[in-house]
Image (cartoon, rainbow, N blue to C red):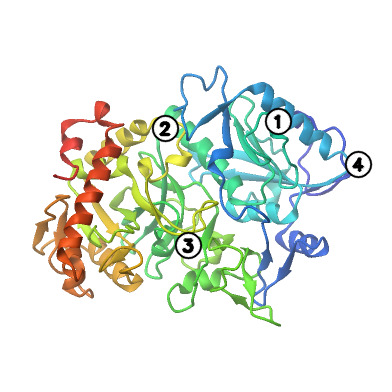
Amino acid sequence: MQNLGLKPKNASLAYLGISKYDTVFWNLTPAQLIEESIRKGEGYLADTGALMVDTGEFTGRAPKDKFFVKDATTENTIWWGDINQPIEKEVFDSLLSKMAKYVEDKQLYARDLYACAEPEFQIKLRVITSTSFHNLFSNNMFIRPKPSEFVGFEPEFTVFCLPEFMANPAVDKTRSKNFAIINLTKKIVIIGGTGYTGEIKKGIFTILNYLLPLHKNTLSMHCSANVGEHGDTAVFFGLSGTGKTTLSADPNRQLVGDDEHGWSDHGVFNFEGGCYAKVINLSKENEPEIFEAIKFGALLENTRFFPDTRTVDYKDVSVTQNTRVSYPIEHIPNALIPSVGGIPKNIFFLTADAFGVLPPIAKLTPGQAMFHFISGYTSKVAGTEMGVTEPQMVFSACFGAPFLPLHPTKYAELLGEKMQKYNVNIWLINTGWTGGPYGIGTRMKLSYTRAMITAAMESKLDSVVYSAHPIFGILVPGSCPGVPYQILNPRATWADKNAYDEKALFLAKAFQNNFKTFESSATPEIIEGGPRI
């Protein structure tokens, strides 16, 4: 057995049950990891210097194969159900033991990292992987310690990821051969049977969604955030595919982060040290910051080259529509380092409405904001999860239900307290369809969405005339700089107005049916914030 690289003093993997191995490579540099990946045949260098790899069978998350160990720590705190599925600690222990046995003759890659840019909330992570590119992904996505900080590093949480290790459902009591299991008592996450790197970051996000609201009275958020030249912070909530990464990468504002944040009494802080962006149809013209970030050190997933070149064809979806890139946040020229902003002035709820019903921008009252936050409506876009091939209506509480271990009302209460305390403007932004539903209408132009968000942040919508949507009650501006006024009224964009009315009623009823789960714990103000039928 040998250890190479920057190994922490007295570091051991014995707490994982790992007593034998061929080699552990500790805290290799990105260049070393890329060399390893190419040497082992894991990936190829693109002409930009980025590493391109395939994640195998799984090109998206597998939420039905994610579990929490149910024990004394979690029994009465986790929001158990279809999202947070329980599994016995004996199952976890058995799988961990098998994984430790599996690597006895293998090479491993170990990396020590931080989560949370705000020092008060920072936790120490260790990620152990059997592939170099999963280790590179972890280096990109979390906060990187200085070399001097490795010496006495002692992790608080560990992720042990073996993509090639398959469970036997009949014996191991998992649902299928792939799994992601979180043990909050032992502070270990085990991942097997899937090469999708996003399982690593979402495992840590889920843990922080448990710890921060429960023990730190801090709101954890599935959102992006940026800061203007005058120090004003904006937050963008939304599920994958709604535009969080794209809209937060604004050349005129500093990027705090693109996906996962906390909101304390001091302000907003990034959980991560990098970005994980979708690159389907990526172009330098539409998303220059992301396009230029794909250079040496970045990791492309499931993309393809133009024939006989090493130039990535971002329109090629032959593997998946969920093509991705991860890169350190420093690859964005105007990234805010450390990634900590102030109290938000504007919050945007992003939704990709596949029915073309919701307006492209609307201002929300506090009651409406809470209703839409708890509802978390969007359309699940193709590729984000296995089996999704076209947009599907979905309600995801707090715009991130798959990652919420606690009951949604816990997060909603924290958001409500902060909204009222700091008098934050809340906007609903539809980045989805206009002029008709998916298949008939068209996707909202990115340039229009950017113009509307900029106008809101620059207070240019403060003095315009608003009208209430006849069914949803949300306030729609009558004009917006840089946007055709016809676009602002969704009904006006439909050729068949009766068809719009029918679809709007259908969507409103879907909102009401979904909200029945939360009505018993909702205030009259929140209930009044829903659609009117």
Res. 228 mark? none
Q: Give the quadrant of residue 48.
A: bottom right
Cβ atoms at labels 1 and 2 below 8 Å apart: no
Residue to which mark 3 is pinned: 335
Q: Nearer the viewer, mark 3 or mark 1?
A: 1
Q: Nearer the viewer, residue 235 or 477?
A: 477
Disc nearer the start of the sequence (3/1): 1
Measured in 3D between alpha carbons, the distance from the residue under mark 1 to the one under mark 2, in whole angstroms, is 37 Å
Q: Nearer the viewer, mark 3 or mark 4?
A: 4
Secondary structure of the residue carrying tag 3 is: loop
At 15% from the left and 38% from the top, the residue drawn is: 528
Quarter placement of the C terminus: top left
Residue to which mark 4 is pinned: 1
At 19% from the left and 66% from the top, the residue drawn is: 488
Measured in 3D between alpha carbons, the distance from the residue under mark 4 to the one under mark 1, in whole angstroms, is 33 Å
Structural crowding at the residue carrying mark 3, measured as other residues with C-alpha within 10 Å and reported as few (<14), some (14–19) or many (≥20)? many
Structural crowding at the residue carrying mark 4, measured as other residues with C-alpha within 10 Å and reported as few (<14), some (14–19) or many (≥20)? few
Secondary structure of the residue carrying tag 4 is: loop
Q: Give the quadrant of residue 475.
A: bottom left
Q: From what the image shows, is residue 518 above or below residue 35?
A: above
Cβ atoms at labels 3 and 2 below 8 Å apart: no
Residue to which mark 1 is pinned: 170
Measuring from the top left, give residue 525's x and y in whole percent. 16, 35
Name the amino acid type tagged 2: Pro
Residue to which mark 2 is pinned: 213
Secondary structure of the residue carrying tag 2 is: helix
Measuring from the top left, give residue 478's x and y in whole percent. 12, 66
